[in-house]
Image (tube, rainbow, N blue to C red):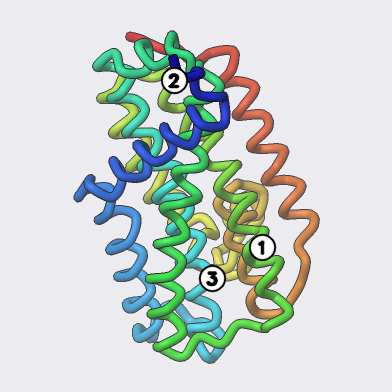
Amino acid sequence: MSAPAGASQRVLAQTRFEAMSMLRNGEQFLVSILLPLLSLIILTYSPFPDLAEPRIDVVAPGVLSLAVVSMAFTGQAIATAFDRRYGVLRLLGVTPLGRGGLIVAKTFAVVVFYVLQLVVLGGIALAMGWRPELSGVPPLLLTIVIGVLCFVALAMLVAGTLRAEAVLAVANLLWVLFLGLGLVLPTGSLPGPLGTIAAWLPSGLLGDAARAASLDGAWPWTQWLLLLIWGAAAGLLARRLFRWSD
């Protein structure tokens, strides 16, 4: 008789399943790659809003941040909510994988899928003339990882506390709000107190951190710390409030 699979093997197997499910989901592909790609093209070639030149250098890191939110937050929140509604989470939660293993696998799957997003969107941005600071590539990648962790935690909070239909509406609404609150464009370009508020929200923190790394080669420690605080708070709330079945 063969020995049972270890914890790491179970998580990796579930990660493969989650990643393949994302790849086969046409709606997820649309939200995660095509919409950020359209944003990249429109904002780069449109004269509005007024941005520093070359525009692509400002727009590209924001679009990579938008891809994080599309995949780690909107896509995961909706998928997890409907998995819960149809009883998938309840069944997986009592398998040897366990509830903790399931959440880890979902996070790993997001990272795997985001690598594909990064290759596609980053490659197109480079072809369009994006030239990030080479010294900023490591902090940009770290920003992306921290952003994924933060927004997956927020997705689990939303998906685990609202009904699936409500999650569908809320996740898409928040995607639109995040888009305008510092994610794609600098928080400093937003009017009045809106920019100040956006700079403290996860969307503004992620967008500004990505731009600081890409444009200036900076290591945005403050934004990283605040993103981790947002993620930790969302994770703790999700752990207490998450419902594994409707």
Q: Is residue 46 above or below residue 155?
A: below
Cα gap from disc 1 to disc 3, whole angstroms:
9 Å
Cα gap from disc 2 to disc 1, whole angstroms:
28 Å
- Category of crowding for the residue at label 1, using alpha-carbon neighbours closer than 10 angstroms: few (below 14), some (14–19), many (at least 20): many
- The amino acid marked with disc number 3 is Pro
- Category of crowding for the residue at label 3, using alpha-carbon neighbours closer than 10 angstroms: few (below 14), some (14–19), many (at least 20): many
Which mark, residue 61? Answer: 3
Near-viewer residue (94 or 160) = 94
- The amino acid marked with disc number 1 is Ala
Residue 141 image position (x, y, % from top left): 63, 63
- Quadrant hosting residue 18: top left
Q: Which residue matches tag 2?
A: 160
Residue positioned 23% across, 45% down in the render: 25
- Quadrant hosting residue 172: top left
Image mark count? 3
For the C terminus, the image quarter is top left
Q: Earlier in the sequence, mark 2 or mark 3?
A: 3
Residue 10 image position (x, y, % from top left): 48, 27
For the N terminus, the image quarter is top left
Q: Is residue 216 above or below residue 234?
A: below
Cα gap from disc 2 to disc 3, whole angstroms:
30 Å
Give the structural element (helix, strand or loop) at label 2.
Answer: helix
Residue 46 image position (x, y, % from top left): 35, 83
Q: Earlier in the sequence, mark 1 or mark 3?
A: 3
Residue 194 image position (x, y, % from top left): 57, 54
Residue positioned 51% across, 28% down in the render: 103
Q: Which residue matches tag 1?
A: 209
